Image: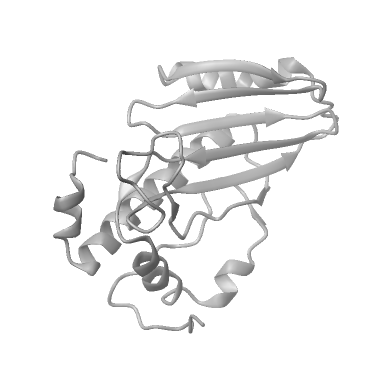
Amino acid sequence: AAGMTQAEVEALSPEEQFDLFGERYVHAEEMLADAQRAVSSDSWTWGSKGTSPNGGLGQRWAMRGATNENSYMINTSRTIKLPGARGEKADLDPMIEYFESKEWDVTVGEYPDTGSFYVRASTQDEFGLQYTIRPHGQYSLELISKVFWGDRATLSTAIVERIPAEEFEILESPPGEYIAFPKWSDPIVTTIE
């Protein structure tokens, strides 16, 4: 997991784990934004906001011994309804070209009996992106990280309690706008029940 063993991560202080997650979160959001721009710089609707770590158990890049408590992954997504979009397979082309320009491993496929198509990419640092187009014109882009070692519950609380609640109310934005990752020194502004 990013070149760190479970023991090395467990030896980090809560603040160091927090900062490490913040670096990964910003990297994921910037990677997602670059891919969004390959399709449209207009506003996209937010799906998963990515600010809290998700459990790493059962994920594609899960590690031996990983649980939802001792590991995590990052998941963030956006959707867009493009003018006149009807889910034609050729609508994948801008994203295929973008993924290939990055020299990522690319897979194109179709969901049987749905008329929906997708293109997936695996990056050199083991992030996965998937762009899905559907006949009703709602297209989505999702990024999932590999699994990292870390205390998921402690991280989630430390992050969420430092982000003002209104930040989570954002529903859409152009690529590159996302919830700013807090600093460890920021005051606690949200109570976690």
Could you tell me residue 115's position as x and y percent?
81, 22
Could you tell me residue 3's position as x and y percent?
19, 38
Q: Say which residue appears at 50% left-offset and 77% top-offset.
A: 164
Q: Quick one: 3 or 71, which is closer to the camera? A: 71
Which quarter of the rendered picture does the N terminus lie within? Answer: top left
Q: Say which residue appears at 58% left-offset and 29% top-offset.
A: 38
Q: Say which residue appears at 57% left-offset and 39% top-offset.
A: 142
- How many numbered dots are placed on residues in this image? 0
Residue 191 located left or right of residue 116:
left
Give above or below for 129 relative to 163.
above
Give above or below for 41 relative to 122.
below
Give above or below for 155 relative to 190.
above
Could you tell me residue 85's position as x and y percent?
82, 29
Q: Quadrant of residue 77?
A: top right
Residue 50 located left or right of residue 83:
left
Could you tell me residue 155's position as x and y percent?
35, 65
Q: Say which residue appears at 18% left-offset and 44% top-offset.
A: 4
The residue positioned farthest toward the front in the image shown: 65
Q: Quick one: 96 or 193, which is closer to the camera? A: 193
What colouring does the structure picture have? one colour
Residue 66 located left or right of residue 44:
left
